[in-house]
Amino acid sequence: MRYIIDPLHSDVAFRIKHLMISNVNGIFGKFDATMESESEDFEGAKIWFQAEVNTISTNITDRDNHLKGEDFFDADNFPYITFESSKVEKINDEYTVIGELTIKGVSREVTLKGNYNGNDVDAYGQTKYGFELDGSINRKDWGLTFNLEGGKGSLLIGDEVKLMINIQMMKA
């Protein structure tokens, strides 16, 4: 069975430390995903995901433009962040999703943990399937190495990026 994302009821967010004392949160405004699964519990599913870098938003235009620039994502040369799963495993009620995350032309294996929240029929008669995934990556593994010293010698931003993904899928 093939599933597609419902972008109106999904979000892809991240969080990173600022000055190592607080967090900066951001989202991607445009993204796409598909899932192929022969199993009703989605174990063994194949997942493909793509986010448009130019739609990154942290609610501060100057910071967003900096993130889109060469110091970070270099959106002119690398307009998309992609993920393709290699393994989806269900253990009890939790899922482990392993796959290749490609940022700025660099691909690395990542592991996400997740939950299937069930399904329900919306007001238009479409069955929606809800998922939550989270994980963390080290931004330097993808060549996102920009940093400055902040006050008291601390780094401007941390290395660990937390990923928070909430998705509704529907049959294609």
Image (cartoon, grey):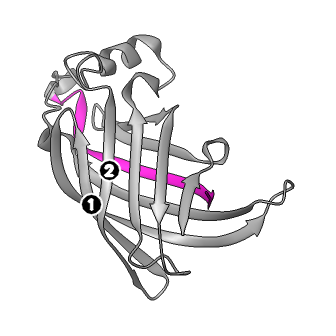
**Can see residue 57?**
no
- In the visual, does 24 lie left or right of 168? left
The residue shown at (16%, 51%) is 108
**Can see residue 162?**
yes
Element type at mark 1:
strand
Residue that mark 1 sits on: 99
Amino acid at dot 2: Phe
Please say if the residues under marks 1 and 2 sit with CB atoms less than 8 Å apart: yes
Q: Which image quarter is the C terminus in?
A: bottom right
- Could you say which quadrant of the image residue 104 lies in? top left
- Please give the range of residues in magenta: 154-172
Residue 137 in the magenta stretch? The answer is no
Rendered location of residue 157, percent (x, y): 25, 31
Residue 167 numbered mark, or none: none
Which sits in the foreground, 83 or 125?
125
**Is residue 74 depicted above or below 2 in this figure?**
above
Rendered location of residue 113, percent (x, y): 38, 68
The residue shown at (17%, 25%) is 147
**Is residue 35 depicted above or below 40 in this figure?**
above
